[in-house]
Image: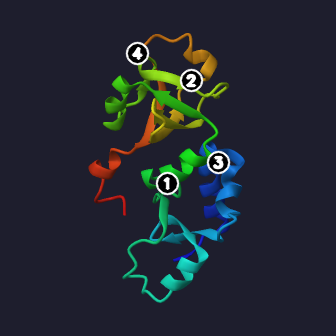
Amino acid sequence: MRPLTEEETKTFFEKLAKYIGSNIKHLIDRPDETYCFRLHKDRVYYVSESLMRKATSIGRDNLKSLGVCFGKFTKTGKFRLHITCLDYLSQYAKYKMWIKPNGEMPYLYGNHVVKAHLGRITEDTPEHQGVVIYSMSDVPLGFGVTARSTADTRKLEPTAIIAFHQADIGEYLRDEDTLF
């Protein structure tokens, strides 16, 4: 477990900023305790400093995970967010999208969001922007990237894709062996 290098930090924060923007500062500057991001086996963990100090007594080979896994670095150096960080993304998200009950199951099976399933969307959401996807009862279901801006979405036919799937809570069951 080690701190992120400058290049890793830049890549990680750029990806995180697509979803929560300048609210990244709320993750680090917390009133209750000091939190930090640490890298362990290509995965980035969000952990309190007190827990991190206690974990130093555990050997690297024996440490499975620590804190909340935000995602992992691929072999090419890109960063991929995991569904395990959804609680924090939904708390600080700049842009949100709500889908109708008939669109929840297709989304949870890994499909993109089509216009027919859209309940509502945050006003002035730009194209290719990270969004957190909610059910109509405000339960976070996952996150994705918008295919169209809010203004363009109104003109589309019902079968047009408006958000590309990135991750959903169904991954806890589908990918349980690779999440950690």
Quarter of the picture holding the C terminus: bottom left
- Residue at 33 percent across and 51 percent down: it is 172
Give the residue pinned by disc 3. 17
Horizontal side of residue 36 vs 74, given as left or right: right
Give the total of numbered labels.
4
Categorize mark 4 by other alpha carbons within 10 Å: few (<14), some (14-19), many (20+).
Answer: few
Find numbered disc 1 in the image and state the secondary structure of the residue it sits on: helix
Horizontal side of residue 50 vs 164, given as left or right: right
- Residue at 46 percent across and 72 percent down: it is 66
Q: How far, Cα to Cα, is label 4 from label 3?
A: 29 Å
Give the residue pinned by disc 2. 148
Q: How far, Cα to Cα, is label 4 from label 1?
A: 30 Å
Amino acid type shown at disc 3: Ala
Find numbered disc 4 in the image and state the secondary structure of the residue it sits on: loop
> Which badge, 4 or 1, is on the more N-terminal residue?
1
> Which badge, 4 or 2, is on the more N-terminal residue?
2
> Which badge, 3 or 2, is on the more N-terminal residue?
3
Residues 98 and 131: in front is: 98
> Which badge, 1 or 3, is on the more N-terminal residue?
3
- Residue at 64 percent across and 62 percent down: it is 9
What label sits on residue 85 in the rendered view?
1
Give the residue pinned by disc 4. 159
Q: How far, Cα to Cα, is label 2 from label 1?
A: 24 Å
Horizontal side of residue 78 vs 106, given as left or right: right
